[in-house]
Amino acid sequence: MDGQRSEGSGETIFTMEATPLKFGRGSSKEVGWEVKQLRMSRVMLVSDSGVIEAGITPRIQELIEAEGIEVELFERTRVEPTADSFQEAADFAKEGGFDGYVAVGGGSSIDTAKVSNLIGTHGGEIMDYINPPIGGGKALPSPVMPLVAIPTTAGTGSEATPAAVLDLPDLRVKTGISHRYLRPDRAIVDPNLTVSMPPEITSSTGLDVVCHAMEAYTNWPYDQRPPSESPEERPPYQGANPISDLWSRRALEYGGKYLRRAVENGQDMEARSAMALAASISGIGFGSAGVHIPHSCSYPIAGLKHEYQPPGSYPQENKFVPHGWSVIVTAPAAFRFTYESNPERHREVAELLSGQRIENADENTLPEIIIQLMKDVGTPRGLRDFGYDEDDIDDLVEGTVKQQRLLVGTPRETTEEDLANILRESMENW
Ligand SMILES: [Fe+2]
């Protein structure tokens, strides 16, 4: 197909590894039983102050302790973790002698638990494991201790993915660690835990769900990529494949149908449940397929400047661009750019998100539907709202090309000039 990347002899194999999932209102009450099944006797419980204050974490702790299992609470998870905050948690893990981990919170808590588990089990330096070219890209030598993830936001899908993301303020970049052994052993997704999320966080996390699904579904297909030399070298993010497509399609349908309702009325349990499920569904899809341009750009957008004060109930002491908003902001321009790689897939995404049959789609159809959704859920208009202007484009491009692990999923050749154009178009989306 015109504009599509192709390889002479492509990969013939893909894998689908998913976290066993327990879903439903009230499901978090069964955490004690789940932890016992995994034979944990001494647990590091990872959470953050907001979730603890909401009373969620203390209840989880009691339920685990009721099974005769020791629990040590680590409560200093930082929203948007940094190398320092990961290090603090990792030191806690090294000293604690834990044989199991439970995370309660958003992606930040779950990612902090993944890294604590990694360093608690294998030791070493966090930087050794961070994705190249920023870190050493060292593979985990063997599996880590069991981890149960209990998300309280409906967004990152971290409960279902092999990745942990962190901010490196000194290097002015966000990056991550990804390895299949980091994927949690169980996810307990209880929509009741998401009810207290304010509209801004519902908006940002929900748009993250939608972006995961859009980027996974339009990803560079697995069978057009060069084959992996060995099973160890097959990356966790392998490209769009027939199984990841199923998950991505359903997540798009739910995101289009329920996100507006969840933002408008946090007590709408049908919408809350659908978005909580969509987050995990989407996580399973992109956990296999990967993401591409919007997520690659989101890391420098969040990492380069810390000038934006998120509205509403985001932690006030902390200036940052919420992850979902840092991703969605380049999505209209990114999908306008990738359209020619596979017009049919872009039309399908537009149909799933809008819930309507679309006969004549072009490169602007999907971007217009995304922009309408952004407006409806109160998203900032573009990069300028986050404190960026045209003078920052070069730095943003430089930060984006460092995300090779993600950019490899882009379904067409993408030059630095192309990225600069996408970022420039994203200054104001309307
Ligand atoms: Fe994301």
Image (cartoon, rainbow, N blue to C red):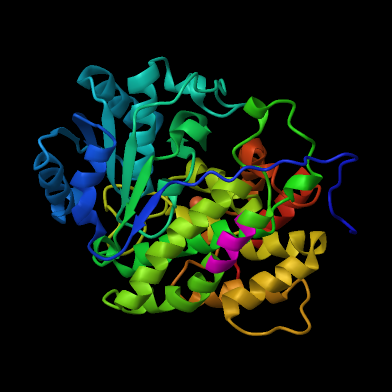
- Residue 233 lies in quadrant: top right
- Residue 426 lies in quadrant: bottom right
Image side of residue 376 versus residue 112, left or right:
right
Secondary structure mostly taken by the magenta-highlighted segment of the chain: helix
Image side of residue 245 versus residue 377, left or right:
right
Residue 28 versus residue 172: which sits nearer the camera? 28
**Labels in figure, total:** 0
Relative to 358, say whether 19 is above or below: above
Is any atom of residue 368 visible in this view?
Answer: no
Q: Quadrant of the N terminus?
A: bottom right
Residue 155 versus residue 145: which sits nearer the camera? 145
Residue plotted at (27% across, 52% down): 315
Q: Residue 382 at what x, y percent from top left? A: 55, 63
Residue plotted at (68% across, 56% down): 242
Residue plotted at (73% across, 66% down): 345
Q: Quadrant of the C terminus?
A: bottom right
Q: Residue 342 at what x, y percent from top left? A: 79, 62
Q: Is residue 69 magenta?
A: no
Residue 388 versus residue 423: which sits nearer the camera? 423
Relative to 300, say whether 360 is above or below: below
Q: Is residue 247 magenta?
A: yes
Chain part drawn in magenta: 244-250
Q: Residue 105 at what x, y percent from top left? A: 29, 49
Residue 189 versus residue 49: which sits nearer the camera? 189
Q: Residue 112 at what x, y percent from top left? A: 35, 36
Q: Residue furthest top?
A: 124
Is any atom of residue 225 visible in this view?
Answer: yes
